Image (cartoon, helix red, strand yellow):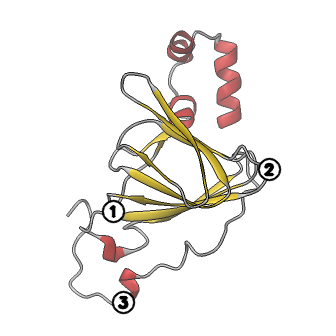
Amino acid sequence: MNGFACKASFSASDFFFAGLATPQPTNNTLGSNVVLANVMLVPGLNTLGVSMARVDYAPGGIRPPHTHPRGTEILFVLYGELDVGFITTANVLVSKTIKQGDIFTFPKGLVHFQINNGKEPAAAIVAFNSQNPGVQGIPATLFAATPPVPDSVLSKAFQISCQEVDAIKSKLA
């Protein structure tokens, strides 16, 4: 079902995952790190329609604009403070600053983001109403696709020069 066969035999380990307990390093370009707990890592989630993740953010760390085509996301702040938002299909930005203990919901399929504008690290637990919500990062989708989206398309769509398109592509390669 949903691309994953039901298991004839199973054990408790099919329903267990300890990977969300520990903060992860954020010393990368984006200043964030995501650990997923979906059906690929927790086979017992198959057909249950749920999954989770942990996201750690350095000060200034970001989860760039992205979408989950197969699931709604609800984010719970463990510690720190995040600026979050999504864009409706009418191009309206819905955003808020949230802090420890707060939640924010991102509707299925809508482009959304999170950024830690604070001076301290932040972390969140997210839950999805899908065993495998998928993720499509907007910058990488447009500027790092294989084969590449033609420069002329990106140049015209963003009203920038082809040189600027190439500069963005080189940073995301």
Residue 137 visible somewhere in the drawing: no
Residue 153 visible somewhere in the drawing: yes
Residue 117, image x and y in percent? Answer: 72, 43
Residue drawn at x 64%, y 13% is: 162
- Residue with the mark numbered 1: 131
| Mark 1 and mark 2: Cα distance apart in space | 34 Å
Residue drawn at x 37%, y 53% is: 133
Q: Is residue 30 left or right of residue 20?
A: right
Residue 111, image x and y in percent? Answer: 45, 35
111 lies above or below 73? above
- Nearest the camera: 27 or 62? 62
* SS at circle 1: loop
Nearer-N-terminus badge (1/2): 2
Q: How many marks?
A: 3
Picture quarter with the N terminus? bottom left
* SS at circle 2: loop
Residue 151, image x and y in percent? Answer: 56, 17
| Mark 3 and mark 1: Cα distance apart in space | 18 Å
Picture quarter with the C terminus? top right
- Nearest the camera: 153 or 24? 24
* SS at circle 3: helix
- Nearest the camera: 166 or 36? 36
Q: Is residue 11 left or right of residue 115?
A: left
Whether residues under marks 3 and 1 lie with C-beta atoms below 8 angstroms apart, the answer is: no
- Residue with the mark numbered 2: 119
